[in-house]
Amino acid sequence: RSVAVLLENNKSLQEELDHALSSLLGSMDKRVWVGIRLCPHQSQLSPLVSEGRRVLQRVPGGEVSFFFDRIFKEDARQLDVWSSLQAPMMRTLLRREHCCLFAYGQTGSGKTHTVFGDEGDDSKGVAFRLTESLSKILNGFQPGCDGQEPKESVSVEFSFLEVYNEKIHDLLSNSKLCTLAGERDELAPGSAYKAATLSAEERVVVKGLTRRRCEVNQLTEQVSAWLQEGAASRMVGRTVFNPRSSRSHAVATIHICWNDPKASGKKGNETRLYIVDLAGSERCGQFATSAEQLRQGAHINLSLSTLGRVVSALSRGQGDHVPHRDSALTWLLTDAITGHQARAFMIATVNPEHHAETLSTLRYAQAYSSLQSDLSTKIPRLRAMLRTLQRKSEVARYDLDALCEDINKNSRFGKTTEWNRQTLKSRVVRIVRHGEEHFQGHPFLKWTELHATKAILGQAGVVEETCPVPPERDDGNIADVEDGRRQHFRTGPTAGSCARVVFAGRHGHPSVHLWFPEDALEEVSPHPRLRELLSNFEQAEAALQQKQAQLDQAQRAFSAQMQQFMES
């Protein structure tokens, strides 16, 4: 209360504080933050060496280096882990961006301990410390002691589920089975004759999932109790590495809805905070102790491998297909993994005593760490837009070519020349009635038998060039002799512009090029529907080229950022 009164009485201090907070929230955080936590081990000679942000893994024939945002050694405390995550995660939430915290690693390496921890203040996991920090921040959006209404209010809900054998179970409702579905916001209502207009962006919802309302001033106590309730319902089993190994992926979600007090009855934007404890990665074929555990391990590895393929497709920055829906886990976390307004944090835990599993975990975390740029998620969206525009362009091209073929087949015009994309973009003409009269007394051109033949047939041609005076002909070239130019140009008054017209050859005959006075020609207009289809095709091509340029630019920028990241 004393701080609030001080800020209320000192406007300059209030403005200075607002400016500092704006600068802090405006600072850009990495798209992905990855930390490695080493599990305490008994081995005296570890093949894993950590130096600053670098990890060296000894392998037969040499060493492999990995670089991450933070390395937590064996003696790191739970508080040390949370201290590295607190500031960027809170900034992300205050910027109204989705946030996802992953715990990844082999069975028995300390994932669940990192997320949930044990009883006691020093052993509390990241999830409980996160709710404490979040509660302190969100309490600032509640009505203060002075009775003044805040500019924005918040409401909070909590859900907790597990993905077990590719099925969704509600951990807050006796492991009830739920289903995933995609939904789009309705932009405009439909009618009996027109479908509703839906937004392009799809969001994933879990049908039948329990969402419990949280009181902001009791957020820490309520969420902590529900986390413990849900964690007790998780599917666990005995493995070679861990007597109580998590056999499912647990996803706790805190839904923060930002409401405008003035907009009564209207729901505000929602920010989601995901806390994900992934099941242990392992070679189930080698370490499974039963047929059921082998099946569990297969489903676990399916989710993890799909997550790896999603990350790999994004990290390449080539706009490859991103297989979100190949696994329930990746589809559920689509907006957190690939959303353009989302940040992801991963704690990868390793046990240096198990060399192969440690190397696999480090490689997986390194691939995820490469998602440092928002461009990695922008490129797949641009590629999807590009594919849509390509389909539109192909449809427009097909419609245009089909109508051209139909007109050419069923009209007299098609017997003398053909409408196609090239002729539609060109100037098409034919000889006017009594066109030979315009050649009489012309100083440069003469009427020939070829001119007469084209006039009788009514054949149309395409204007190649126009000029005041045609170039002199070459008598050694037969085509020049027969194209309508005089052997010797006469002098006299200006005769007007001249045009060189090409008539397409038919039945194996070559094209014919003839010169005409402009007055001897008349324009031939295509069918209005042809013009409309040509305009549609040109617009589709222009949009396609523009999107391709944006994609190329994004890929170049992504390559430059990745090069800069690797050099740093």
Image (tube, helix red, strand yellow):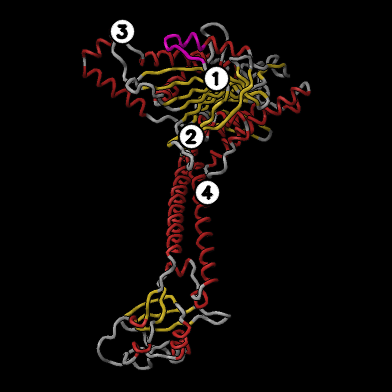
The local secondary structure at tag 2 comes to loop
Gap between marks 4 and 3 measured at Cα: 56 Å
Q: Determine contact: label 3, label 1, CB under 8 Å.
A: no
The amino acid sitting under disc 4 is Arg
Packing grade of label 2 (10 A; few <14, some 14-19, many >=20) is many
Dot 4: few (<14), some (14–19), or many (≥20) neighbours within 10 Å? Answer: some
Q: Distance from label 3 to label 2 (Cα)?
A: 42 Å
The correct choice, above or below, for 504 with respect to 5 in the image is below
The reply to whether discs 1 and 4 touch (Cβ–Cβ < 8 Å) is no
Dot label at residue 387: 4
- Disc 2 marks which amino acid? Gln
Q: Amino acid at mark 1?
A: Ala
Q: Is residue 439 left or right of residue 50?
A: left
Secondary element under disc 3, as helix, strand or loop, is: loop
CA–CA distance in space, label 4 to label 2 = 25 Å
Check disc 1 and report the residue beneath it: 252
For marks 1 and 2, the one nearer the N-term is 1
Q: Look at the picture and state if 109 lies above or below 406.
A: above
Q: Which residue is mark 2?
A: 372
> Residue 217 falls in which quadrant of the image?
top left
- Closer to us: 100 or 210: 210
Mark found first going from the N terminus, 4 or 2 = 2
- How far is disc 1 from disc 2 in space, using C-alphas? 24 Å
Q: Residues within 10 Å of mark 3 (few under 14, many from 20)?
A: few
Chief secondary structure of the magenta portion: helix
Give left or right: position of 561 versus 60: left
Q: Which residues are magenta?
A: 212-223
**Mark closer to the chain start, 4 or 3:** 3
* Mark sitting on residue 218: none
